Image (spheres, rainbow, N blue to C red):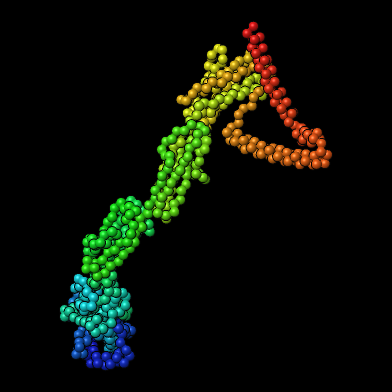
Amino acid sequence: MMITEKLARGLVSSACSTAVSHTGALGLYTVNAVYGDTITMPCPLEVPDGLMFGKWKYEMPNGSPVFIAFRSSTKKNVQYDDVPDYKDRLSLSENYTLSIKNARISDEKRFVCMLVTEDDVSEEPTIVKVFKQPSQPEILHQADLLETEKLQMLGECIARDSYPEGNVTWYKNGRVLQPVDDVVVINLQKIVDRTTGLFTMTSSLQYMPTKEDVNAKFSCIVTYYGPSGQKTMQSEPVVFDVHYPTEKVTIQVLPQSSTIKEGDNITLKCSGNGNPPPQEFLFYIPGETEGIRSSDTYVMTDVRRNATGQYRCSLTDKSMMDSTTITVHYLDLQLTPSGEVTKQIGEALPVSCTISSSRNATVFWIKDNTRMQTSPSFSSLQYQDAGNYVCETTLQEVEGLRKRQTLKLIVEGKPQIKMTKKTNTNKMSKTIICHVEGFPKPAVQWTVTGSGSILNKTEETKYVNGKFSSKIVIAPEENVTLTCIAENELERTVTSMNVSAINIPEYDEPEDRSDDNSEKVNDQAKLIVGIVVGLLLVALIAGVVYWLYVKKSNGAKGKSENAAAQNFPSLPRTASKHVDKDLGNIEENKKLEENNHKSET
């Protein structure tokens, strides 16, 4: 066995150059590894029959071999050569795959796999490439500020620990910065660490900024190579403070509202477009000949309409100036009368709402939270006219400019009473109603005349527009006289009504209708009256024409009178009806008196 191993070692030594040239002709295997990871190199050779052992070596720059690992196929034992660079880093598997832990830049070599039989020695080289990604580039030694029209150092972009070496490119707002004489000056340095073999790239940028570089984002990108090819990595963007002189002055009104009204607070702000901006200005107020020196703002509180005018500001040396015009809107309202007003029913009350404004104003009236279609006018006050009136005006173009005044109208009236009665449908009772008007609301009391007893079982309707009604239901066995008493702060009103016994027939008086129905009846009555008047006029005209015709034709006065009488046949009958009605009322009263007399007897 000793003789065989020695023979094999000699064969290996004599076959090295041949194997290298043979593999060079066929091409080389390449393994790409990441710095710090494990390098795995499979043996490129097929394991032959009769294999005695396999070995790995690497080649020095001068071509001399350095053996690092040995594995016997018969004894299954593994031996690693005493090479300091690879101590405790090697591992050789049964299929002769060599692994190297913690890859270093110095591992970038030509390794050779050797398989030995009794008859032959086979070799196949593998090239190891090691790659190291650099640290993220960062911009250091940044300038505190940049001044226009001045070439100065902007900063240095540094990317550390790269292998192989990379390249650095500067960008502004995502675009590559190309070198320009006296405007963009770039200098790149690459330094290698002799211990690790890693590169550090440093690129400095000198730059002459312009006003357009305000808020510009500067960054740098490092380009490097990895196992899968070329890659890039970008730094965090940096924005520099660019200083430039003021070229224009601007005045503003704050808050930036399209309209200003009386009572507002106004701030005038003057600014220059330089960086840093000017800190002091001169403000020119209407009516003032000299400018007022102030910071970049001038405040006016609770402005009035006389503040309308032109305002200006300038730099303290008066070299630049800007102006603006301010209009202070106003709105005045005068309601006459206003507050609480008390009037008597039937009186007249003139009401006026006078407006004075900087623009056309919109005026509207509200009564008891309901918008009115027209302005109120009171020639003869009624109870329904009472209420809370509001005259309100606005300038639609001016937000928040609104004025209003109120009128609380109270319409007072002495109590007015009207009594009605009716026999209920069951003929067993009668309903007596006392219709009351007045304000303040009268208190109503029912009594029986003669006995003076008070009737408490009454019902009242809702008090609306100064009107309500109180009713009682009775079934009198004999004739009675009921008294309705209505009283408020102004007067006490008393009205009585005779009511006959249930078994005595009488003419019942109709009830008053509700306010809404009465208004409709009034409207209908007005329409009927108008129609009747129109018909009468037509009849009169026709009678006159006929009379003239008869007079002209016959010349007889008697005939014209007969013709006129024929045109008005209903007038005597209508009068007779009224007389009959009056006589009926007299007879009814006589019957009530006779019945009362009989009951007393």
- Check the picture and name the quadrant holding the N terminus: bottom left
Residue 389 is left or right of residue 329, and the answer is: right
Q: Please, is residue 8 above or below residue 314 in the view?
A: below
Residue 79 seen from this side: no
Tell me if residue 494 comes above or below residue 411 in the rendering: above
Q: Is residue 182 left or right of residue 515?
A: left
User: Furthest-top residue in view?
Assistant: 601
Rendered-image quadrant of the C terminus: top right
Q: Residue at x 50, y 44 (%)?
A: 375
Q: Is residue 492 above or below residue 399?
A: above
Foreground of the two, 336 or 382: 336
Q: Position of residue 52 (x, y in %)?
A: 27, 84
The count of marks equals 0
Identify which residue is drawn at 53% across, 16% down. 454
Apparent side of residue 100 relative to residue 441 in the rendered image (left or right):
left
Residue 169 visible in the displayed image: yes
Relative placement, left or right, of 263 versus 583 is left
In depth, the one of 304 and 26 nearer the eye is 304
Residue at (59, 32) in percent of width and height: 514
Looking at this view, name the residue that lies furthest to the front: 555
Q: Position of residue 63 (x, y in %)?
A: 21, 90
The spot of residue 73 in percent (x, y) is 27, 80
Asked where in the image residue 46 lies, by quadrant, the reply is bottom left
The structure residue drawn at horizontal position 28% and vertical position 70%, both measured from the top left corner, is 248
Rendered location of residue 290, percent (x, y): 23, 62
Return the residue nearer the eye: 133 or 476. 476
Question: Which residue is nearer to you in this view: 553 or 573?
Answer: 553
Single out the residue that lies furthest toward the right: 554
